[in-house]
Image (tube, rainbow, N blue to C red):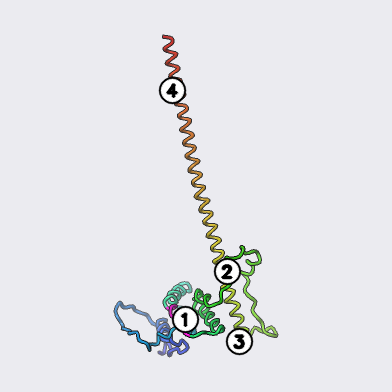
Amino acid sequence: MHAAGRLNCAANLASDVDFQAQVFCRYPVQLVNAVGAIYASHQHQTSRTFNILSIPGWANLFQRLDRTVADLSLLEADEYLNHRRIMVDRFKGIWRIPSNTQLPETQILYLAALAGFRLGDWDFALTLLPPEQNPTNREPPGRGDLARILILPDWPESQGGSKNLGTKEYKNKISSLLSFIKNIDAKICYFDNIINEQSSVVRNISQYKSEIERLENLIKIKEKHIVELKNSRWRKIGRIFGLAKAASFE
């Protein structure tokens, strides 16, 4: 308790996992292939209430974990991110459960921001946003479209040039950024499709080229065979004339 701290109530229903993560960052862990406990499912168990509203607690858990790993220099960044992705894959089914009640748009936006920026679950975060126009239904993007892909939306400034955003401005900023990211994701899929189509064409051209080369080699072999047959035929004709001439002298 002294090393890991008290139970983190900000993690809400994930506070037990948060406590374990903090302990494991400070003490070695031994995995034992044996039954440690048996849990019985019942209607009043806490885990039954997990759903999309659990995202803030899990976001707090991962925020603390990220900070602890960095402060204690436990792992290199790439190695930690690999372990982090495994942990997200393990628990993401919990916060992806829909809520039993209709949520306001501002709350959905807040949860989408946490799911993407804190949890790294962008696949789920983007599904929470309203659908963007599918770029695959349009003509190939021009130069202006490519420029918009690379430029982030402007950071809204309040009066006097200050970047201390109020609640409304902050929500607008997050909404704009998330919509921008979702639009990028759609454009990436669009360009991936183009690349795959071009790769398919290149592969087909390569196959056609190989087939043409094979046929050209076959034609050369046939032509050589035809020449050999002609030469053989003329040699036979020559021998026949030779024999006929010799017979006439006799």
Q: Which residue is mark 1?
A: 98
Query: x, y percentage for residue 171?
Result: 59, 83
Q: Is residue 245 above or below residue 140?
A: above
Give the residue type at disc 1.
Pro
Q: Which residue is mark 4?
A: 236
Judged by depth in the image, the label closer to the viewer, 4 or 1, is 1
* For marks 2 and 3 on the same chain, the one whose residue lies earlier in the sequence: 2
Q: Mark 3 near mark 4, Cβ–Cβ under 8 Å?
A: no
Q: Is residue 95 magenta?
A: yes
Which residues fall within the magenta stretch?
A: 91-100
Give the residue type at disc 4.
Lys
Q: Mark 3 near mark 1, Cβ–Cβ under 8 Å?
A: no
Q: Mark 4 near mark 2, Cβ–Cβ under 8 Å?
A: no
Q: CA distance from mark 4 to mark 1?
A: 91 Å
Query: x, y percentage for residue 172?
Result: 61, 81
Image mark for residue 167: 3
Q: Which residue is mark 2?
A: 134
Query: How many numbered marks does the figure carry?
Result: 4
Give the residue type at disc 2.
Asn
* For marks 3 and 1 on the same chain, the one whose residue lies earlier in the sequence: 1
Query: x, y percentage for residue 121?
Result: 49, 76
* For marks 3 and 4 on the same chain, the one whose residue lies earlier in the sequence: 3
Considering the numbered disc 1 on the image, is that residue within a helix, a strand or a loop? loop
Q: CA distance from mark 2 to mark 3?
A: 30 Å
Q: Quarter of the image holding residue 143?
A: bottom right
* For marks 4 and 2 on the same chain, the one whose residue lies earlier in the sequence: 2
Say few, some or many: other residues with alpha carbon within 10 Å of mark 4 (under 14 / 14 to 19 / 20 or more).
Answer: few
Give the residue type at disc 3.
Thr
**Quarter containing the N terminus:** bottom left
Q: CA distance from mark 1 to mark 2?
A: 25 Å
Judged by depth in the image, the label closer to the viewer, 2 or 3, is 2
